[in-house]
Amino acid sequence: MLRNLILLWCLSFSLMTNGQEYKYNYSFFSNSAMSGDYFFSHISNSGGSAIKNVNGKLPVNETIFHTPGNSLELTYKNAAYGNWKAIIFRQEKRGMDHFRKARFLSFWILNTSEISSGLELPVVQLMRNDSSLSQAFKITPGKANQWQQVIIPTSSIQNFDPDKPGNFIAVVLSQQNKKDNKEQTIYIDDIEYLSPENGGSVTKMPEITSAVGYAKHVDISWKMQNDTNIHLVKIYRSENGKEYSAVGIQHPYINRYADYTGKTGKQYFYKISFLNNKYEETKLSAPVTATTKPMTDDELLTMVQEACFRYYWEGAEPNSGLARENIAGRQNMIATGASGFGIMALIVGTERKFITREQSIERFVKIVNYLENAETFHGVYPHFMDGTTGQVVTFFGRRDNGADLVETSFLLQGLLAARQYFSGNSEQEKLIRDKITAIWEKAEWDWFRQYPESKFLYWHWSPDQGWVINHNLIGWNETMVTYLLAIASPTHPVPVSMYYSGWANQDSTGRKYRSNWGQTSEGSTYTNGNTYFGIKLDVGVSNGGPLFFTHYSYMGYDPHFITDRYTNYFTNNQNIAKINYRYCLKNPKHFKGYGENAWGLTASDGPFDYSADEPVPWQDCGKIAPTGALSSFPYTPEESMKALKNYYYNYGKFLWGEYGFKDAFDLTHNWCSEIYMGLNQAPMVVMIENYRTGLLWKTFMQIPEIRNGLKKLELESKNTQEQGK
Ligand code: CA
């Protein structure tokens, strides 16, 4: 008994200490995602001074680098009357907001010719977030053509707080007062803050556990080593098993690397090593080998599904087993809606045997045990939770500290599918079903009307601020699932009439809401009726909106079986996907890359910000998210397959990674996202599966409560239609 108590105490203590977010190394530059020019740089020059640029940015060099695959090149000329300047901005990543203490600014530099005094070299400054600059630091020259590390203690930088490294947003290199008029070339790489606390030697040895060849890439994974001194994992490739060259790096929190070689039918050998933050290297691992091979369309689909599935399998928050908002991002924080999508991706992974049924059941037991004890508000989960404590995380600000009805709908859509899928008689499968039923039945949908006679459901509720966000749910958008589940609830249902009074509201409240976000009156009465690119749209704001509207509610709900007074939602979704496709073909803003092989505007990460792109010029900023076309497979199979092949075969070098396609890319700005998003990877897995076998649609549509809910809607539609006549 006492022993158990001590164990319990130890467990709860470890839970508390685990609550601390993962602290990232703060890096200004390690590699450019794209060849050519570096998006997060800016150069300028005056007088007779010059600096080489590509499209106004610093050139990326892929043959000379400190860490593979590239570095930044500075080729410049210092003139008597003039100056040049290169600014390297840190790339902001969503949720990457906890950092190690920044004790040193470190970067690696290589000068290509012998430099005696160092006056030919640029000076280094840091830029604060108000654009002011620190004092300038000089660089001592090293031997020609050898990488040397430059270290500046941050204590010598004016007003530097090592706990707030983000107060400085860029590194600036500029001409020193030396008018040699000679052209110099230097390379710079791995600009970052370092902390001596993580500066020890790596004692763990690297070990590759698998290597699998696909059409144009090899996927390798290794044993995850828990050693805080591992700064990076370095990947080496060989074509003959003898000479190896460094081809890539990986962060220590991911134990997988997708090496896109671009060649099919070729054997490769791999080794890896660990680097500490002095870039001292462990011994190399034993080699492994794999051969790339031609792949059928079917195999390509499975490849994409499996890679994206891994985001929710090995990329999951370990304590809850649920999905992170994005990777890399907050590591302890889970996103409720993305977790619901991820649950459906796990079901696909089980059915396709990416994992065994036993592994899957073990994961689902973990998930339901976590959710059973996680914080809810009137039975409704918040948008973000701490995976270690189950408490709400106010990632979107203080007001969002309570329930999120829409995110909970996405979660429940996944959970209910899982309840139906795990139909076995084992204790564990029964436990999964019972706990999901309890979670489903405690959700008080009717509370979210705000007041008894309300026509609408409301998105948020806060325990201390009530209805402060006051966002009523009005379609057409991604929230149909919320009304359908609220109507279907066996314990806290809302009247079916709310489908028409709320979701499809046609009075001034609905019209105003839709005109506001669509920036047009088209579709503002819920129904649309206009023709876009030759396609008639029954329902939809503007010309249909971002594509995720046709995905999120319909991963479980089969739109073939959702027909209201105005349209059938398979047909309507298909039309929205086709409009999106044809808009991208027309490409009125002349963005690079748009066309029959690259299309699908939707919500994603972007070069400037996360945004929900739509097929209208005022909501189209030039980025394409692979999830747009690929999660539309059931609606546009041929167009989606063309996009998939183009993204993999032509853009794989920058777009393909360990969890499948990166979130988005923008060829006009020569930018590719370096993150994966929880809301975007799973819809590809699930909707491709719905296209291939209908697995999630069939499973979900068997659920008795769901069938009852849709029956109610059918009756309501019929009755109100008759009344309307
Ligand atoms: Ca590099």
Image: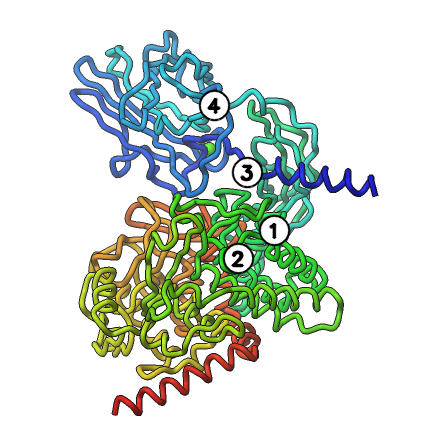
Mark in the foreground, 2 or 3? 2
Q: Which residue is mark 1?
A: 320
> Distance between the Cα atoms at labels 2 and 1?
10 Å
Residue 386 in sight: yes
Rendering coords of residue 202 (x, y %): 66, 27
Q: How crowded is the residue under tag 4: few (<14 C-alpha within 10 Å), some, or many (20+)?
A: many
Label 4 CB-ligand 1 distance < 8 A:
no
- How far is the residue under mark 2 from the one under mark 3? 23 Å
Q: Which residue is mark 2?
A: 339
- Determine contact: label 2, label 4, CB under 8 Å: no
Residue 367, position in %: x, y?
Answer: 62, 57
Where is 573 relative to 106, above or below? below
Name the foreground residue: 697 vs 621. 697
Please name which of the two marks, 2 or 4, marks the residue nearer to the observer: 2
- Please, what is the three-letter code of the amino acid marked with disc 2? Ser
Of 95 and 357, the residue lying toward us: 95
Check whether the beta carbons of the residues at disc 4 and disc 1 lie within 8 A of each other. Answer: no
Q: Earlier in the sequence, mark 4 or mark 1?
A: 4
